[in-house]
Image (cartoon, grey):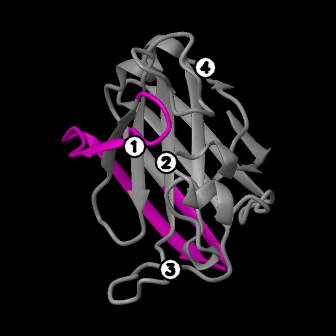
């Protein structure tokens, strides 16, 4: 499957705490308006490629508290009725892989609702390859043995553009789960 998806801004008003919903209430357009998703499943697991326009990549934000790195995440539900837009719910987790432009290795993420994301080391067989050229990021995730995706065949993704101050819950997202073929 290969398809381009229109993205929406993650709703700032649903973020935990007071600061983000108050300060970013008017932020209703995503910094990244669309992304191309390609999904392949085979004996070696899942190969998922994301591509998006990014005229000003940020690979390093060290030493600058006003700068954020580019990133992308893939998510799958751990149960059939886990909600994507709320990052799951108690006992209805979502899990996935997080790529950041400032790291060589992926992070494994898991959440049971907004503000609950936990990061950990990924399985040894999870890898990502990235490339930025001609104002475009291309990131390919190679994910062998991902039971959540194998079991539910649903995927979602998020993209952060650091130069646009995307970070945490401020991101561009696909608005619903995407059905993928096993």
Residue that protrudes farthest toward the bottom in the picture: 63
Q: Earlier in the sequence, mark 4 or mark 3?
A: 3
Give, as a single range, the part of the protein colored magenta: 112-139
In space, the residues marked 2 and 1 are separated at their CA atoms by 6 Å
Q: Which mark is residue 181?
A: 4
Residue 11 location in percent, x, y?
A: 70, 47
Mark 3 lies on residue: 58
- Quadrant where the N terminus lies? top right
Q: Residues within 10 Å of mark 1 (few under 14, many from 20)?
A: many
- Disc 4/disc 3 C-alpha distance (Å): 33 Å
Q: Give the Cα separation between the discs numbered 2 and 3.
A: 16 Å
State the SS at label 3.
loop
Secondary structure of residue under mark 4: loop
* 69 in the magenta segment: no
The image shows residue 61, relative to residue 85, as above or below, that is below
Task: Kindly identify which residue carries mark 1.
Answer: 97
The residue located at (65%, 27%) in the rendering is: 177
Q: Nearer the viewer, residue 7 or 29?
A: 29
Q: Residue at x 41, y 36 (%)?
A: 96
Instruction: Determine the CA span between mark 3 and mark 1.
Output: 19 Å
The label shown at residue 73 is 2
Which residue is rendered at x = 36% and y = 19% of the image? 147
Q: Which mark is residue 131?
A: none
Q: Is residue 58 left or right of residue 21?
A: left
Can residue 32 be seen here? yes
Mark 2 is surrounded, within 10 Å at the Cα level, by few (under 14), some (14 to 19) or many (20 or more) other residues, namely: many
Label 2–label 1 contact, CB within 8 A: yes
Give x and y (percent) for residue 73.
49, 48
Q: How many marks?
A: 4
> What separation in Å lies between label 1 and label 4 (alpha carbons)?
19 Å
Residue 10 in view of the camera: no
């Amino acid at each position: 499957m290969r398809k381009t998806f229109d993205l929406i801004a993650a709703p700032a008003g649903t973020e935990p705490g007071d600061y983000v919903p108050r300060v970013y209430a008017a932020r209703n357009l995503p910094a990244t308006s669309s992304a191309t998703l390609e999904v392949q499943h085979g004996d070696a697991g899942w190969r998922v490629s994301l591509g998006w326009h990014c005229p000003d990549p940020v690979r390093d934000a060290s030493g600058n508290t006003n700068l954020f790195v580019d990133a992308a995440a893939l998510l799958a539900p751990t149960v059939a009725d886990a909600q994507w837009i709320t990052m799951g719910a108690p006992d209805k987790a979502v899990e996935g892989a997080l790529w950041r432009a400032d790291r060589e290795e992926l992070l494994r993420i898991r959440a049971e609702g907004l503000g609950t994301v936990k990061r950990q080391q990924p399985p040894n067989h999870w890898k990502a390859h990235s490339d930025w050229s001609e104002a475009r990021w291309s990131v390919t995730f190679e994910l062998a043995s991902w039971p959540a995706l194998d079991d539910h065949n649903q995927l979602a993704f998020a993209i952060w553009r650091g130069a646009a101050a995307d970070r945490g819950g401020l991101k561009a997202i696909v608005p619903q789960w995407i059905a993928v073929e096993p």
